[in-house]
Amino acid sequence: MKVSGNILKMKTTLSNPVKYELPIGDELVDMNAFIGKKIKLTFDGQINCISTGEKISKSYNQGYSFRASQKLAACDICIVKPELCHFADGTCREPEWGEKNCFAPHIVYLSVSSHLKIGITRESQVPTRWMDQGASFALPILKVNDRLTSGLIEKEIAKTMSDKTNWRKMLQNDVQEVDLEQAREDIFEEFADLLDDFDADDLDEEIITINYPVTEYPEKIKSLGFDKLPTIEGTLNGIKGQYLILDCGVLNMRKHQGYFITIEA
């Protein structure tokens, strides 16, 4: 098999294990089918902005041109730090986009990719967000009406626990044992007044367990990238998060959105 085209982040389907499909050009390639096989990925030097399609020499915010990264609401700092939302000030880069994406129900959740962390996502992105992060376990705990509110809640809870994923430990499958249900109850008790102030709805959901198509986890992490290594070749030992786990290192596919790649297997 040989397929060429610009790539986007892998599409995920929650199954046992997670199903991964790579958008490349006009194709949607089943990546699970290559587990345990030799694959070769070659970057020809061409990058296209995933928003405008224009050729660029360097990508920003995982696939955008510099101009797009400065104009699009999806690339604004409030996407990374939602508590900095400035829609109410009338300065949103794309008000219609903001109304559609930021003024939609959001979920505050607990997850374990390596250790316990607090996070937020649009309700429509459940469970995609967790698979993209490589979470082994996830538990929705709160539902609110908009992104700003979820960000303010996350910021306060993050004072007592992490809001970051240790991607290296995640890829080594170094996952701590955590009682997510107890952690949820602890949050409900400790932050009861805060949650009442923000009119957050408590959720009584079951823990979601996520298994990934991996035959062998790396003992050491070697990060690979097309900018320094145009040709990457090796046995695909697995996929977790948005990473291909090869016997020669790990490759973040989302980081290379917009790159024109040829895959041979």
Image: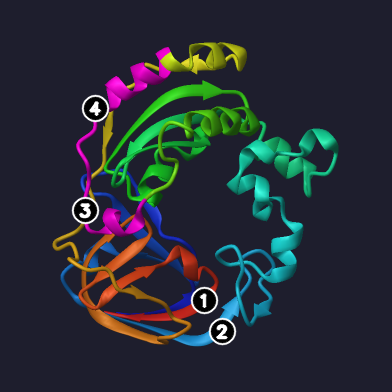
> Which amino acid type is shown beneath numbered disc 1?
Tyr
Magenta span = 166-189
> Which amino acid type is shown beneath numbered disc 2?
Gln
**Could you tell me if residue 26 is visible in this image?**
no
> Which amino acid type is shown beneath numbered disc 4?
Asp
Closer to the eye: label 2 or 3: 3
Could you tell me if the residues under marks 1 and 4 are in contact, i.e. CB atoms within 8 Å? no
**Residue drawn at (24%, 33%) of the image:** 178
Disc 1: which residue: 259
**Residue drawn at (18%, 74%) of the image:** 37
**Residue drawn at (45%, 41%) of the image:** 163
> Which amino acid type is shown beneath numbered disc 3?
Asn
Q: Secondary structure at mark 2?
A: strand
Disc 2: which residue: 46
| Label 3 crowd (10 A; few <14 / some 14-19 / many >=20) | many
Percent x, y of residue 16: 21, 45
In this image, 169 relative to 7: left or right? left
| Label 4 crowd (10 A; few <14 / some 14-19 / many >=20) | few
Q: CA distance from mark 4 to mark 2?
A: 46 Å
Residue 225, picture quadrant: bottom left
Could you tell me if the residues under marks 1 and 2 are in contact, i.e. CB atoms within 8 Å? yes
Q: Secondary structure at mark 4?
A: loop
Residue 241, picture quadrant: bottom left
Disc 3: which residue: 173
